[in-house]
Image (tube, rainbow, N blue to C red):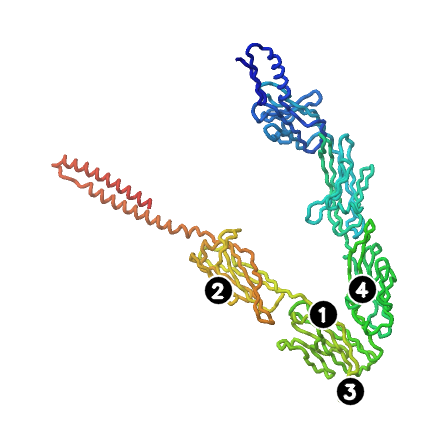
Amino acid sequence: MSGVMCEKTGQVLLITHRKDMRTLPFMITLIFTVGLSVGRRVSLPAGPLIRVEGEALSLRCEVSDYQGPKEQEFEWKATKGSETIQVVSTFDSSFPDQSLKARVSTDDISVKRIDESTVELRIKEARVTDSGTFTCSTLSTDSVISGNYEADVLLRVIPNTLAVVPEVPAPSVHEGRFINLHCNITQNFTEGIYLSVTWSVKKDQSLEQDLLTFGPDSGLTVGKNFIQRYADGEMHLHMDNTGSYSLVLSGAVPADQGVYVCTVKQWTREQGTWNRIQEKAKVIGQVAVITTAESLTVQVLDSTIFNTGDNLNLTCLVSADDLAALGLEVTWLLNDTQVLTHLSRDGVVAKTSDMFSINRVGEGEFRLEIHSIELSDMGLYSCRVRAWIQQSWGKWYQAAEKTSAPVQVVITPKGPVIGVIARHNRQATFSGSTFEMNCLAKLKNLSESVALSVIILVQYGVGAPTRKLASLSPDLVLKLEDWHESSRQNGLSLVKTGNTEFLFRIQSVQMMDRGFYSCEVAAWTRPDGNNWVEITKGESNKIQINFEHTSPSFDLLISSDTTSVYPWETVKIDCNIGVSGTSNTDNVAYEIRWYQSHLRESDNFVLLASVDRWGVVRKSIRNDTSDCSLERLGTQRFVLTIHGTQDSDAGEYYCTATPWIRSTTTADWRKEPEIRSKRAFLNVKFALWDSMKLPLLYGTCTSLSVGLFSVILGLLVSLCCCRNKSGTDLIRHSTHRLIDMHNLHEAEACLSLHQSNNVTK
């Protein structure tokens, strides 16, 4: 049997004939067809390709259906007109044309291997002169030449004419107004080039968020965080033929403030997909949104002292930036909770009583009127305003709400009346501060000869019973009523400071003193000259003592008298505690701990010593010759002293403090969180002379001793060997002399060996 075998890409055809060769022509034709259909294939992207001057570009070349080694070699050439030049090769560094060698050596032009059969021609900054037909070719490694060994693509590099010029928007807009974002774009027309424009915003430290993208296919893409905003009609895109693109955001909200950016991209359509060939981004500007709450102010005007039967008139004055664009909802309140009357933003009045009326008398002015007031109408009046903003599709949202400071309305009867006004003289803002309340009595239908008394009332909570703290009689005798703090009796005082004025003071207020304080002033007379008779009395408004209890704050500072010492010296490291929020150091104690690490920037610290809040010092076991001690130099200063420092004392030190605070009421101790200081570094210098002087002294003494011993031994040996023998025994003498000389040589050898050993030691 005879046969012909053809192998191509793993396929084997075996032709056999026994008696005739009639099938051979058919098989040859089949082999040729299969070879052409599965031969080597070199491919490039379909052209023409358009790129922009100054931008990076890459051309990917891929070979498939080949034989031979897996890693293939590639060559790139460029044809401009009738001239073809060599660009770059994967295996021949001398391949580039002379005109391109400088760009190849600087990697402006390079070839990057993606895998064994794929490479990319890369140009960092394309030039217009790079336009032409680029050819990618591969070397043949096939047993049979078939398929294509090169591919061409037409590359066109156009000038960079894209220009993006934004218009700076208004730096600040009021809430509810418009934000106009203009971006002017110019470019030379090139067929096959498409544009896209993206508006984005960067808020504080967050990532940039896309608002809207137009293009490249004339479609709109809305950012995921602005889909509802776009659906509500608050984003509008405007374009014209001059290259002006504008995005308008209506109904600005505080979340809209940030830095706005316009990004323009150029695209080409290649192989059914969009390919970005250039991108330019410009900052449009930073926009701040002025919130309505920032500018909204509400205050109550007019007189606040009336007689029974009068008409009460109070005016609520509202002011804000862009007030005309706001819908105002006004509510009058009595004692913060009782609603007297209400005016909606549409001007509808909610009737709660025929006694009350509310009218809008001007822009931002709303008047409350109460007819024929009574004593029950006395109290704290305030005006609550809600500001609404209408969005572009007609929906309203509440932008701000503010309530005026309450004003005390005092109503006096037509008979003898005492009106009392309580005011803060000193407001208690923290535990330990002083509270002062001024009580001023307004007398009507009373002679100035009447005597006044005052009682200080307190209500320790809303709805809690009223208690009497102290009183001052018409004879100006002070009496402590329900004040049972025997340890604080000297901290309370009540004095008369004027004809109708009293001053109440609590020194070093505590948490238990929080509540509502008022004055009750009574007028007295002595008809018979002996006994006092009360004419009338009046109670003031309430003054609140309210503060948040805050624990003292502590900080820890570590310092050293030196940062570098020699061995055996002493070093001191201070640990100072700073306290704010309390001045009574007798009620604060500290636990102090000192730590050391031999390595810098290490977290491996060991405890050196500690002192507890009772002053008991504990030290860790040390293996070094140095020692440490702790010393307290003040209520808040602790010193660690290291005596006889050694190399092992070098490193970083820090201290920790655990404050303990004693309650002034229960005398119980409360543990506060531990605070930690920064690290302080101590360097122990190396004493060169101290480490070398003893070895040098020992070596010098040893050398002198060995030398002196060698000289003495030599003299002794010379004297022994130079004795004269009798002449009659010459032969014997000669023999002994030879033996002596031999012994001398052995002695010298031993001496040399002994000296060498001494030197070695």
Sequence-first tag of 2 and 1: 1
Residue at 73% x, 48% y: name it: 258
Q: Amino acid at mark 3?
A: Arg
Q: Amino acid at mark 1?
A: Val
Residue at 25% x, 43% y: name it: 714
Q: Which mark is residue 617?
A: 2
**Residue 455 image point, x, y percent:** 73, 78
**Residue 98 shows in the view:** no
Sequence-first tag of 3 and 2: 3
Q: CA distance from mark 4 to mark 2?
A: 63 Å
Which one is in front, 65 or 470? Answer: 65
Which class describes the residues within 10 Å of circle 4: few (<14), some (14-19), or many (20+)?
Answer: many
The residue at which mark 3 appears reads as 526
**Viewed as shown, does residue 486 lie left or right of 245?**
left
* Mark 1 secondary-structure assignment: loop
Q: Which mark is residue 462?
A: 1
